[in-house]
Image (cartoon, rainbow, N blue to C red):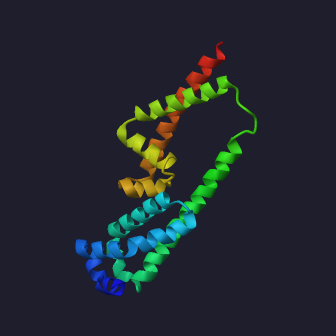
Amino acid sequence: MEQNIINSIDVEQLAARDHDAFRRLFMCYFPKVKRFITYFVKKETVAEELSQDLFETVWKHCEMLRNIQSLNAYMFRMAKNAAINYLNHKTVEDNYLSSYIPDEVYSPEDEIYAKELALLIRLTVEQMPQQRRRIFEMSRIQHLKNAEIAEKLQISKKTVENHLNLALKQIREVTMLIGLFFMVQ
């Protein structure tokens, strides 16, 4: 049955953005891709999100499918790359966090200060213009690279960099103000 579905997926139809061909591709490969990615990332929710992103990419760039020799190998390679990219990103993030978390115990006042600072930063981000906020969240929360953000939003990489610089400037101003406030005691 599954082999019949695979055989019924016409790469030319996919490349021509045929919804039925894409549905067949999705139905056939999504469970395999998700299972494969889950094996490496060890989190089913992350694997599901990565798998969905993978199929979104396939749909966005489906015209490139005309150039592939094996749909099976192509999907496997994309799943492997998605898992590797996630794990690399996670390693960098974990190393960054571990290098900035001191071993000392915080006082209750320090914890309150940290929570208040986090709240002010979140409020600052929420007050940003929509495009700037979206770019900042894609960069800092979704951990996308500037080029990936530019591609997703169909804007230039320089525009992404400008928005991030303005967002960080706003956040620095707020953190400096709260720092001054707590220093005057």
Along the line of sight, the residue nearer the viewer: 15 or 19: 19
Q: Can the viewer see residue 84 in this picture?
A: no
Q: Could you tell me residue 104's position as x and y percent?
A: 76, 35
Q: Could you tell me which quadrant the N terminus lies in?
A: bottom left
Q: Residue at x 33, y 66 (%)?
A: 60
Q: Could you tell me residue 72's position as x and y percent?
A: 42, 82
Q: Residue at x 47, y 58 (%)?
A: 45
39 relative position to 134: left or right: right
Farthest right residue in view: 104
Q: Could you tell me which quadrant the C terminus lies in?
A: top right
Q: Can the viewer see residue 46 in this picture?
A: yes
Along the line of sight, the residue nearer the viewer: 64 or 90: 90
Position of 146 relative to 137 (above/below):
below
Q: Could you tell me residue 31's position as x and y percent?
A: 41, 71
Along the line of sight, the residue nearer the viewer: 154 or 27: 27
Q: Could you tell me residue 27's position as x and y percent?
A: 33, 73
119 relative position to 130: left or right: right
Q: How many marks?
A: 0
Q: Residue at x 46, y 43 (%)?
A: 136
29 relative position to 144: left or right: left
Farthest front residue in view: 1
Q: Residue at x 60, y 61 (%)?
A: 88
Position of 136 relative to 11 (above/below):
above
